[in-house]
């Protein structure tokens, strides 16, 4: 499998782009994680990876989207984006996740990539704005990987994304990327209506097309159109984890997950401090789906000080780690309400209904399933996670699995949808 994957990378991807991936994201990304570990030992903090939602606007209206895409357009200006990246580079960072809305609606995004050739950017996109000209521009930049979301067949895609003819436009954008030999990924937010994509046949199709990596997210019922009926059952989440582990062992495609370590234990990247999120309004949030903040990039102080001194973010990491190895948004929204109250955190949604949505949320299962861990079969993934993607002692310090029990009554009574 490893030889076949290496062959694909060498033959199906532009060599210059492959080198940018290996150097900017791979070697320099590993260095940023090592620096993060050293900072933690000294009681210092700066996330090694930062996700930035650069604009709220989008041409689609997806179920479960937490972004106020229908609100008046708001974006992070290029100079502020440049400052975020530059200050993060000074801390050793080299990788940035770019989100929206739809990031390609930000007219100056491509210039940001050109300004920082020593960084690597992963753009989460629906693909509709990736024309041949845009794909050629990304190839010239060399430091960008588009991650294009595919949510099912034509009917499911239209339903999930609130528009018609969505899939054909997405697939055209995907093909434009592949035609230009970009390092291209496909992601899917797994839910009740597209769970049938979780097949070996689908993975084989992606490989045949030339897709180099895929990412299966678990649907989270958040936002103004939460659609909780789409959530996966605990058994389906377990099936998804098993599928990823199995496919990783013998398919020549990279399969990403962000919620498990190499031993199969659940983790939350925000709770471990691996990453935090910046909204289109510049609010610094624990993660994209937790729209609460006390800090902003527009404060007149360096980001280094903001991340280090934020009591809200520090308390979030500790609260999340003490309560669950899974997703606190799904399992314990009540704790987020209490966290916001303790620190006077702002509702950072444009719709200003974030607190009401938290209060109305039902408790749902997340990736945390104690005593049912599914370890990695692939030695490469197991090693990589042990070295560069684990809990950094977060849960050892705060969390005792054997003593954990639900403290919110509906944890024990809520039925899975």
Image: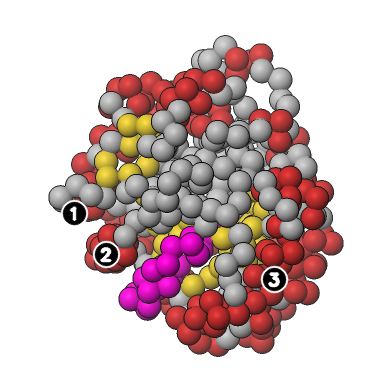
Tell which of 45 and 195 is nearer to you. Answer: 195
Q: Residues within 10 Å of mark 2 (few under 14, many from 20)?
A: few
Q: Earlier in the sequence, mark 2 or mark 3?
A: 2
Of the numbered discs in the image, which one, if any, rests on residue 172? 3
Q: Look at 77% across and 48% down and name the residue there.
A: 156
Q: Quadrant of residue 75?
A: bottom left
Q: Which residue is mark 2?
A: 79
Q: Which residue is mark 1?
A: 302
x, y percentage for residue 201?
Answer: 84, 62
x, y percentage for residue 26?
Answer: 47, 71
Q: Earlier in the sequence, mark 3 or mark 1?
A: 3
Q: Residues within 10 Å of mark 1 (few under 14, many from 20)?
A: some
Quick check: can you spot residue 224?
Answer: yes
Residue 170 falls inside the magenta stretch = no
Label 1–label 2 contact, CB within 8 A? no
Q: Is residue 278 left or right of residue 260?
A: left
Q: Look at 45% across and 81% down and name the residue there.
A: 141
Q: Is residue 167 left or right of residue 136?
A: right
Tell which of 71 and 47 is nearer to you. Answer: 71
Magenta residues? Answer: 103-124
Quadrant housing the C terminus? top right
Is disc 2 placed on a helix, strand or loop? Answer: helix
x, y percentage for residue 265?
Answer: 58, 42
Residue ranking furthest to the left: 300
């Amino acid at each position: 499998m490893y030889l076949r994957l290496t062959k694909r990378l060498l033959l199906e991807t532009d060599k210059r782009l492959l080198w940018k991936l290996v150097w900017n994201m791979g070697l320099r990304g590993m260095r940023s994680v090592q620096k993060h570990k050293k900072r933690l030992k000294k009681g210092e903090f700066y996330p090694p990876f930062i996700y930035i939602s650069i604009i709220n606007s989008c041409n689609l209206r997806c179920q479960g989207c937490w972004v106020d895409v229908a609100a008046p357009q708001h974006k992070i200006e290029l100079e502020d984006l440049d400052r975020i990246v530059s200050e993060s580079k000074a801390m050793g960072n080299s990788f940035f996740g770019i989100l929206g809305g739809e990031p390609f609606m930000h007219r100056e995004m491509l210039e940001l990539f050109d300004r920082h050739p020593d960084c690597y950017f992963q753009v989460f996109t629906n693909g509709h704005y990736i024309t041949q000209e845009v794909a050629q521009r990304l190839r010239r930049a060399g430091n960008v990987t588009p991650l294009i979301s595919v949510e099912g067949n034509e009917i499911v895609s239209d339903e999930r994304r609130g528009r018609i003819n969505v899939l054909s436009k997405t697939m055209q954008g995907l093909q434009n990327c592949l035609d230009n030999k970009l390092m291209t990924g496909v992601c899917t937010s797994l839910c009740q209506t597209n769970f049938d994509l979780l097949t070996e046949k689908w993975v084989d199709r992606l490989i045949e097309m030339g897709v180099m990596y895929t990412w299966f997210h678990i649907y989270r019922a958040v936002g103004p159109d939460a659609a909780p009926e789409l959530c996966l059952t605990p058994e389906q989440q377990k099936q998804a984890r098993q599928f990823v582990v199995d496919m990783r062992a013998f398919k020549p495609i990279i399969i990403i997950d962000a919620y498990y370590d190499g031993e199969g234990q659940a983790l939350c990247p925000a709770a471990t401090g691996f990453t935090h999120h910046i909204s289109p309004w510049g609010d610094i949030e624990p993660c994209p789906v937790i729209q609460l903040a006390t800090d902003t990039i527009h404060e007149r102080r360096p980001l280094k000080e903001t991340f280090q001194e934020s009591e809200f973010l520090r308390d979030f990491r500790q609260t999340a780690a003490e309560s669950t190895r899974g997703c606190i948004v799904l399992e314990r929204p009540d704790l987020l309400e209490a966290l916001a109250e303790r620190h006077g955190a702002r509702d950072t949604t444009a719709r200003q209904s974030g607190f009401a949505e938290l209060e109305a949320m039902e408790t749902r299962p997340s990736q945390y399933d104690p005593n049912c861990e599914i370890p990695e079969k692939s030695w490469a993934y197991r090693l990589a996670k042990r070295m560069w993607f684990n809990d950094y002692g977060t849960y050892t310090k705060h969390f005792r699995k054997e003593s954990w029990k639900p403290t919110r009554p509906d944890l024990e009574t809520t039925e899975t949808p």
